[in-house]
Amino acid sequence: MLRMIDTHTHLNDKKFLGQEKEVIERAHEAGVAGLINFGDTMESSGRAVELSREFEGVYAGVGIHPEEAFPMTSADDDRLAAWTEEEGVVAIGEIGLDYYWEKDQDKRLLQQEIFIRQLDLARQLHLPVCIHDRDAHGDTMAILKKEAKGLRGVLHCFSGSLEMAREVLKLDWFLGVDGPLTYKNAAKLPEIVQALPLERLLVETDAPYLAPVPMRGKQNEPAFVRYVAEKVAELKGLTLEDVARQTTSNACELYGLKA
Ligand code: NI
């Protein structure tokens, strides 16, 4: 039986309000045994924590996304840290840099500041991190090499080069792939997936956005992580079962989930 984990999703997004139970049921029917909802603000982090209390196999990551950057205080750190004491909270994220949406230099500096701050927090809490990097590859890698010592994590929705992917592997981190891998304009991503060991890949949806082919254009949901895993299997000449087994084992290793 298939047993996949959608390692990066947002059932805490308002678009899913009131539909969470059905969406989780559809995920189970599709062979998705677990999912991790990531926060991008304090509010959505809190919602991710609530969902992890409510549903079996539903985990949470808490953190402030770069697009939502604000000057964090120690009270904010304490609030994030308090959430991580709960059993279902398995990571700090999503955190990182987004220079695609943010062109203002001061605000980019604020992104860097709270990125580093949350890496420190994750280290103190002994938790893995989930990284968002959009059009900020150079600074993301520079910060990880300098500030992420002793940490493990994933570059979610990976959009860098093969060279960058190899740098990530050197850190013994993971790369997350989702809907864009299935798109015709996927560019270098299929080649990167072919070149990397399956032991370093995680599958994810980033729902409600980025629905994979053949669901592109619909609202994405955790059940659709199967299409991402199928694409990985096709690219690597493996079966869906092989990909499901290994990527689930990877997710359990990184996030300390029960196998
Ligand atoms: Ni996300």
Image: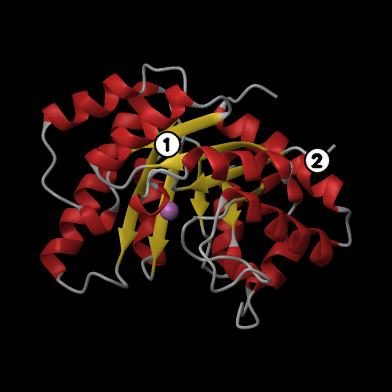
Whether ligand 1 has any atom under 8 Å from the Cβ at mark 2 is answered as no
Mark carried by residue 90: none
Q: Is residue 7 left or right of residue 62?
A: right
Which element carries disc 2, helix, strand or loop?
loop
Q: Which of 81/167 is in front? A: 81
Q: Is residue 86 above or below residue 2?
A: above
Give the class, few, some or many, for how many residues have Cα within 10 Å of label 2's Cα (few <14, many ≥20).
some
Quadrant of the image occupied by residue 43: top left
Q: Which amino acid, mark 2? A: Leu
Display colour scheme: secondary structure
Residue shown at the point (50%, 53%) measured from the top left = 156
Q: Which amino acid, mark 1? A: Lys
x and y percentages locating residue 133 in the rendered image: 40, 60
CB under 8 Å between discs 1 and 2:
no
Give the class, few, some or many, for how many residues have Cα within 10 Å of label 1's Cα (few <14, many ≥20).
few
Which element carries disc 1, helix, strand or loop?
loop
Mark carried by residue 2: 2
x and y percentages locating residue 136 in the rendered image: 36, 66
x and y percentages locating residue 221 in the rendered image: 55, 53
Q: In this view, does 213 lie above or below 115?
A: below
Residue shown at the point (46%, 17%) measured from the top left = 87
Q: Which of 213/168 is in front? A: 213
Residue shown at the point (21%, 26%) measured from the top left = 79
Q: Is residue 2 left or right of residue 12?
A: right
- Quarter holding the C terminus is top right
The residue indicated by pointer 1 is 149
- Quarter holding the N terminus is top right
Quadrant of the image occupied by residue 125: top left
Query: How far is the residue under mark 1 from the one under mark 2?
Result: 35 Å
Determine if residue 184 is in view.
yes
